[in-house]
Structures are given as structure tokens and as C-alpha cells.
Image (tube, coloured by chain):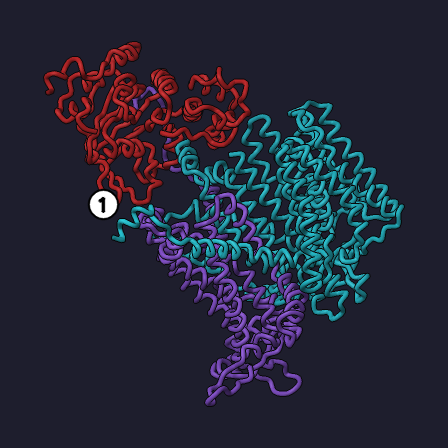
Amino acid sequence: MSNTTSDDSLITTEVQADSNDDRAPLADAGTAVAARNLDVYYGDEQAIDDVTMEIPEKRVTALIGPSGCGKSTFLRCINRMNDMIEICRVEGDIEFAGKNVYDDDVDPVALRRKIGMVFQKPNPFPKSIRDNVAYGLKIQGFDGDVDERVEQSLKGAALWDEVKDQLDSSGLELSGGQQQRLCIARAIAPDPEVILMDEPTSALDPVAASKIEDLIDDLAEEYTVIIVTHNMQQAARISDRTAVFLTGGELVEYDDTTKIFEDPEEQRVEDYITGKFG
Amino acid sequence: MATDNAAADGFGEVSRVRGIVFEYLSFGASVFGLVALGVLLVYVAVDAFDLANASPEWLLTYFLTLVVPFLGFCLYSADDPDVTRRAVVALGGGLVAVAALFTAVEALVAPIPRLNWQLAYLFVVAAPVTAYLAYVGSRGRVGGVGFGLLGRLIGGVAIGLAVGTLFLVLDPLVWFLAYTLGILPAVGLYALGRGRSSSRAQTAAAPIGLLGLVAAVFLRDVVPVFPSDLIIYLWTIAVPVAAAGAVLVAGRSGRTAAAVVGGVPLAVATAGGFLAAGAGLPAPTVLLVLVLTGVPTGVYVSRVVDVGEGLVGLGLPLLLAAGVVAGALIVEAWGVPAPDPWLDPSYLTEAPSRTPTEAGLYPAIVGSVIIIAMVAVLSFALGVGTSVFLEEYTPESGPLGTLTRILQVNVANLAAVPSVVYGLLGLGLFANLLGLGIGTAVTAALTLSLLILPITIISAQEAIRSVPDDLRRGSDAMGATRWQTTKNVVLPEAMPGILTGTILALGRAIGETAPLIMIGAATTVFRAPDSLFSRFSAMPMQIYTWAGFPQADFRYGVVAAGVITLLIILVGMNGTAILLRNRAERGS
Amino acid sequence: MTDSTESPDLTRRGGLTRLKEGTYGGLFAACAAITLLTTAAIFVTLLSDAVVFFRSISIVEFLAGTNWSPNPAGGGQAFGIIPLLIGTITVTITAAFISIPVGTLTAIYLSEYATPNARSILKPLLEILAGIPTVVYGYFALVYVTPALKATLFPEMSTFNALAASIMVGIMTIPMVSSISEDAMSAVPDQLRQAGYGLGATKFEVSTGIVVPASISGIASSYILAVSRAIGETMIVVVAMGAQARMPEVRQALFGIPFVNPADVLFESGMTITVAMVQITGGDLTGGTLPYNSMFALGLALFAVTLVMNVISDIIAQRYREEY
């Protein structure tokens, strides 16, 4: 079985090769986030099992795997959003900016100001477009020119041309895809180092999703993007590195995207990618 | 064989008689309480307005000048031939049916006391049809505009009167200083900070405002000369309200419109205030009513004109006013015998008396307004604080989770404690132990605040819980602290729900009597309270007192008028709350 | 991180931000603490004066005494709660005769028969019944209901009587029964109903045979809550029932079996615990006297009874919430 799939029926990686050729070779990138022996438990259930990985700076890293494999949990460990879940317990280290983010002296609030996040369902605040984008600036006590920053961020999220005349209307009046780009603009406005994306296109139609994909590619110029996705084609298209999680929160394989999709080391990964399960 | 027969007859039929009887029985049960209450309300309305003595001609006159044009307006707005047909059939058919039925009952069974068929028609047919048409009409463009304007006029008058009443106990001089030294600089600084996007100016606003308030209290007895009350109200309320209205309009429709919306009501109110002072009327109240009615009305009219739809609706208040005037003229000209209602302007502006015809509710109304204002502030602050703590600050599990559950159970149990027990708490704790005084407004306000606190908390919690978690997580992920998420995302979203719940709870507080009796509120006071520590009476207290008087004029007249007054205020408050909720639901 | 970018500071900040966070958290906690303090204050206030009262009047005398006359003037002072209990129980039971059947039927209608449109109109309207100030109900009972009953059904009725007051208490508590019962009935899963229809049951059979039994704990909890509300109701009875603490006359039926004619209780004035409390406020309110303290003893009894009923109702209600 696996012989027949090895060259043609695996996911095409041409798109991916296209999109990344303008960046320096992966080997040159520094490390933005590193997990070391990370275990996460929900009550008695283990959601992440001894994960160690280094995520390159200013690159797109995709986390893929079947539902319930712990990829979202891993993502939410990076900015400590799991703190909100009372039964969640984390062991091991996640290093960011030279610190273990689970150290006692780390303020999760300060951490999240450096790590933006985009959610599965667009969740703009019921405020004007301007106030949505300026939200992070407002809570961080930004003292510069807010309007300029709003414009920059909306341009960065490829939304400016569509909304520049209606900055004072509600963010909820936008279409789903526009709302998601508004959320991206909101995330990049305070100029974070890393942007976490939790299946950002799964609630969108294909056209809106492809716009977001293009945008993610651009974002990687300036930010480290870590994206959880269900969609393997998407991972292949947009990411530089791919991590495959399988059931039980085990990180089965983590490598350059090309390698994962063309010639994975593990049989299980190949089975997953070719759609045998998951 | 039996089975063959059954098959030949089809499936046969299972008897539904029991089911149908049961359905009608249960429907009857659902409306039983409402019908009973409706009948009682009809009687109390008849008594309060002396409608039993209203001649058919008088009823007909006002029906034609007031009700019919109003119905026409609603039908015009609804613009639906079906509705029109149904309304005409209901009004016409109802007339015949009620007249026939009523006469038959009177002839065959027994006379129905204090009602005639005209009144029965009015309450059973005309009133529901009018309410239905008002509802349908208000959903059309024209009707929406008309009712919107009417609502602002009535709301403005009510708020103006309430604010004027509050200044009977608040010291205008302290308020003047507090506004000038504290509120104005703080608001100015905040606006400046917002305009220039400088968070430093905004953070400075609160302490500076606070400093000003403290200074105001100290300076109260030091400053030798103060402007007159009228000037104070003009400077501290009329000017800022007019300015706020102008700012609102300026953003939308330009400077000229803004100047008109801000300037005209201000000028009219100022003139009205000085004229009233000359005429011996309470000038500040006149000023407040005029400006608080004029500015919102102006803002509304300017918006309607901008949108340009349903302009005809702006004529509704005029239509009604014209109806009243025309009715009065006809009654006067033709000498139609008119009823002598108990509930008339003098009832609302005069003190209680031993003579039924001279008795008034004024001091009790003032007492109620003052107490409710204090209860509103207290229960809102405590209710929001507690519900935020329970919903946003405490975890659901662990040792703190146990505390949350204890608090929750405690709140639920407090909600079910009889109100008379709260009265004992007020008497024992606030009046006697803390020495706030028996029967004072402060004691009453504190007691009633605690009484409605559980209801406020429970409804505020529901409102906060209905804020989607997505929004919280979105804010948290931006690096917002808990308080920032609460302040910027949760509370603004939950506010309409919280306000609705608070107003509904205040409706409960305004009708509570037992706790007031327990803390020794006066059964009758002849002067409106002039400080928070003076003895006071409240509307329900006065109703209770009068209901015990033996004279029929009190029982069937004066009290009925008091009941109607209280119920109208309640309906107004609850209506506002429901409008608020519907609006918020439509918005999201 | 590479060395080129400057490392962001992730450490906890002291100072103003933390202070602000802490202040707000503390403020909210203080608000929440006030609710606990209220309960504590109710307990302490009631207990402290009640204890003083029970130093002069023994608990047995209080609970078993058949004479209530707190006024020191005009004969002997006596603090027996029995006549007050009789008044309270009379009102509660009579009111329950209205609120329970009407409320239950209303709940069935709303949950099983009403169209969504009818439900959306009826439900808020029913809430009005609970929103009318109770003093207004009392006034209705005294001024309209009593004369109407007197003119039609019961000419021997006195001006102040228990029946009219009880009817009004019953009407007032209808929504308490109907809304909680309806919640419980609506919580019954549709599969159960469909199972019934699948067996050829009519709507009536499904409503009474499946939905009601399935939601019985919720219905029961609503009854208890309505009864507890009726026990604590004050203004309706104060205005309409009068203020005579009486023991009903015990008559002898056939073979000397004692009985009480309901008419003796219902058509005459009486006194409930709440009325007794209100009546004492006519006197001295600064404290220290025996009647003053007796008010708190009555309040304690009332508080204890309603609290226990609410807790029971809560426990029962929990059952139906857990079931589905």
C-alpha cells in the first residue's frame, strides 16, 4: 500500500515550496519557542505526553493531527491560556524569550502581551473596528499614535482597503472572513513576537480561508506563526515546519514540512497523512 | 373475528374528549389569575377616575377626539389592510356583543355594580384593541418615530421631576462645588486624554475628580457667597446636558443642527425657569424638566430628520394634545357632565389630609423617589460587584470553589427570606444598633437595598453568564488582566441585562411595605422630607394607612388613586426595563 | 530567542498595576462578603433579641400557649404562638388550594399545549401577578373581594376575614408554582414524549402520564417555594385579614368527635405571625420591651421555617436537574 502512495498521492508540496522560497533557509532561523519534556494533564487524563520541540523564529510552524491529539492543548500552553481551565496541570518547560513561561515569577498577562492569538471562531469584540484593533494598545497603556497603529495593523491583516471608510462601525457587521482578519489585526496591533492560530480557517468558506492563508504567509515575515490545523493541504501549503501529534498527545514526528509530506519517517504519520485514519 | 372488523373500520378512534376538556381547563387556569387581576384593575381604575359617574356623552367625546385619532395613527403606521379590517370588526362587533351581553346579564342575573355597558366596552374591547394596535403601529416606521418621541417626552418629564425631587434632600451648594471642582475637571481631563490618545491624562482624571469632591465638602461651609439655586442648576445640569446633546448631534448632522439642539432647549428652559420663579412656581424643577425633556427630544428629532423616514410620526404628541384640548372644549361648550377623578394634579401635589377630597400623595411620592434613588445606587453597585466576583473572579472547583458555592446558596436563600424579616433586620441593625434612626429615609434605603440585593445579583449573574466565553478568551489572549477583561468586554456586553434586572428589582422595592412598617416609617407625613435623616412616608405606606380609614371616600377613592399612581410608576419602570432588554437583544 | 531581538520582560510586575488589580478584586470580594454578612446579621439580630425574650417567656410557653396578647395594657400579657400558627396555616392552606392546582395546570398548558407565540405572551403576563405590590393585593381583598363574596356567596362573612386574604395570596403565588414547574416540565427530554406517542398515547395521556411524573421533583419544589412565600406574606393579610388572634371554637360532631368548622376560621378575622409582628410596631420601637423582643422571636420562627422550606425545595429541585 505504502509503495503506491509514496510519490504521487501524498499531498502536493508545490504550493508550499512556492510560498517559502523567499525566506532564508530554515537552518538560519533562531528558536522562538521551545518545549522541553512537556506533559499536560486534564485531571487524570494525559493530553500531552513528553513533548520536546523547538519552534523556529519568523517561520510558520503547523501542528497537525487527529481530533483530541493535544495539538490545541499544546498551542494553549505557549501563552498559558490553559491556566483558565481549572483541572489542567502542566509539567515540563516551555521556553520563550529566555524564560520558562511556567516559572513562578512569570506573569501570564505579560506573557500574553508578547504572544498574540487567533481563535477558531472569529471573536471580534462588539465594538467598532477601530476599538477592536486598538484594544491591545488600550489595555497596555500605549502612548503613541493609536490611529496610525490601527491603520498599520489593518494593512498588515489585508483588511484596510475594505474597512477604511467604516472604522467606526461595529466589527460584528463584517463577514466571517473579514472578522477573522480583524482578529488577526487585533492580535498584531500590540506587535507581539509570536502569533498562535487555533484552526483559524475552519469556520470560514474556502475563498475567505485562502485569503487568510495568503496573509499567514506574509505574517511570517515579521512574526513567528504557530498554527493548529485540521486541514493537511493547508499545513502543506503554508508551513515551513510541521509537527504531527497522534492520539494520546504524543509528538510523533516533527520536521520540515516538505519532509513530512513527502517522506515521513514514521509509518503512522504516513498513514495519517494519506487518510488511513484521523 | 374482532380484528377483521377493526381492520375493516380503519383504525377506529380513541376518545379525545378528556384531552380536549383538559386542554381548555389548563388554558382556563393559565388565564384565571390574569382575568381576576384584570377585573380588579378595572374596578380600581373606575374608582380612581370616578368613571362610574362619567356620562356616556363624556366618554363618547373623548373616545372620538382622543382614542379614534390615535387608532387612526396606529393603523396608518401599520399600513396593513388586514389589521385595519380586524380592528374595525373587533371595535364594531365588540360594541354590539358587549352591549347585548351586558344588558342580558343585568336583566337576567343581577345588576353589575358600578359598571355600565359603555365602560365595559371601554375596558373589555377598546383598551385591548388600542394596546394591540399601539403594538402593531409601533413596529411601523411612522409609529416607531411617534412612540419614540412620545417616550422621550414622558421620560424626560419623569426624570426631570425625579432629579428635582432629589434636590429636596441633596444640598445644591455641595453639588455645585462638587460639580465645579470635581466632576467637570475630571470629565474634561478624560475627554482630553481620549482626544489625544494619552492614557496619562485619563488615569489622572479619577484622582483629580476625587480630590475635587473632597474639596467641595470642605469648602461648603467656607465659601461665603453662592449663586442662586436657579443659576446652580443651569450651570451644573442644564448646560452640560445641552452640551452633551449638541456633541451627540454634531458628529452626525453638523454644527448648525447641534447648535439648535443644544441651544433652543437651553434657552427655553432658562426662560421657563426665570418665568416660573416670577410666577412662584418651583423654578429649578421647571428648568430641569424643560431641559431634560427638550434636549433628548431635540437629539431624537434631529436623528429622525437625518434618516428622513417616518417624519409624519413626529406629529403624534401634537395629535394627542389636540385631542385632549378638543375634548375639553367640547365638554365645556356643550356642558357635558364630566366625572370628578380622585387622581388629578392636585392629588399629586398636595399633602395628605383627613378630608378625602383634599388628600394628596405628594410627600409620599417624594419619599418613594428619594428612597428608590438611594436603593438604585446601592443595590446596583453591590449587585454588580458581587456578581462580577462570583462569575469572573472565583473558580468553580477547589477550596475557593466551595466558597463560591456557599455564596451562591446563600444568595438564593436570601432571595427567599420574607420581606418582613428584612424589616426586623433594618429595625434592629440600622435603626437601633447603628443609630441611623427609626423611620428615616436612610434606614429604609439600606433595608430595601439588602432586600432586593439577591434579586439584583441573580439577574446580573445571568447577564454576565450570557456574555460569550469567546470574547473573554479573546481579551485574555490579548494580555488583558482580569479587571481589564471585565471592564472592557464583559460589563459593556452584560450592562443592558444588568440594568434590566436592576430596574425590575427596583420595581419590587418601590412596592414593598412590610419592611417600611417594621422600621417605623411614618404612616402619614404632611411635609416632604428635606434630609436623608428626616421621617418620611412612601407611596405604599400611605396606601396602607388610607386603606385602614373607615370612610368610603378614602377606601374607594383616595386609595384607588394611590394604587393607580403606584401601578403607573411600576408599569413605567418595568416597561423601560423591557424596552432596554429588547433593544439590547435586537442590537446583538 | 536570537540575541538580536531584545528580550521582553515577562516577570510579574509589582507596583501600580498589581495594586489596581488587587484593589478591584478586593472590592468585588467585599461586595460578595456583604451578602454573607447580611445572613449573619439577620441571624444575630433575630437571635440576640429573641434570647432576651426567651429569658422572660419560656420556649414551651411560647410554642404551646394559646393566647396572644402582647399589649401590656388591658389585662394579662400572653405570648402563645398557637393562635398565630392557626392563622398562618389557614392562609397558607387556603392559598395553596388556589395556587397549586391553578399553577400546575398553567405549567402544563405552557409547557405542553401552548403555541410558542401564546407562551411568549402568557409567561411575562403571569410574572405580573408576582410583581404587583402586595399592599395593593391586600387593598383589593379588603375593598373589592370581600364585599363581592359577601354580596354573593357568604353573607355572614365579616369585613376582615381570612378567605379574601387567602385568595389574594393564592393568586399572587400562582407564578411561583407555574414558572418553576414549567421549567421542570420543559426539561423533560422529548424522547420520553415521543416514546409515549409511539405507543399510541394521546397528548393528554402523555402530559399527565409521562411529563408530570417525570418532572415531579421540580413540581414539588415549586409547591414548597410557593407555600413558603405564602407563610411569609405580610401586607395582604395585614390589610385584609384584620388583627384578632383567636382560637377557633371547637365543636362536637356526632359521637363527640371534635371538629372545627372551617367557616369559623375563614369568614372571621384572624392573625398570622406576620400580622402580629406588624401590629407590635404600632408601639415602642426603640427596643428593650417585651413586645419588642417578641417581634424578633416571631421573626426567628418565621425565618427558620421559610429557610428550612427553601433548603428542602432546593434539595428536591437538585434531583430533577441531575436527572437529565
Residue C223, given in percent of the width and then of the height, sits at 45, 62
Total residue callouts? 1
In the image, residue B385 above or below residue C89: above
Q: Colour of chain B?
A: cyan
Seen from the viewer's position, the closer of residues B130 and B467 is: B130
Instruction: Please state the horizontal and vertical placement of residue B418, each as a whole percent of the image.
Output: 53, 64
- Taking the view exactly as shown, the residue that stands out farthest to the bottom is C255
Q: Colour of chain C?
A: purple
User: A141 or B357: nearer the eye?
Assistant: B357
Q: Find residue C270 and report its image quarter.
A: bottom right
In this view, the residue in front, C198 or B532, is C198
Give the left or right position of residue A32, taking residue B518 as reference: left
Residue nearest the observer in this picture, B428 or B204:
B428
The secondary structure type at the circle numbered 1 is loop
Q: Is residue C255 left or right of residue B551?
A: left
Relative to B327, residue B51 above or below:
below
Residue that mark 1 sits on: A44
**In-image side of B432 versus A9 (left or right):** right
x and y, in percent, of residue B167 in the image:
73, 50
Label 1 crowding class (10 Å Cα cut-off): few <14, some 14-19, many 20+? few
Circle 1 marks a residue in which chain?
A
Whether residue C37 is visible here, answered yes or no, is no
The residue shown at (74%, 58%) is B361
Does residue A185 appear in the picture of this structure? yes
Can you give x and y, in whole percent of width and height, for residue A264 in the image? 15, 20
The amino acid on which the numbered mark 1 sits, given as a three-letter code, is Asp
Can you say whether C153 is above or below C75 in the image?
above
Quarter of the image with the C terminus of chain A in it: top left
Quarter of the figure with the N terminus of chain A:
top left
> Which chain is red in the picture?
A
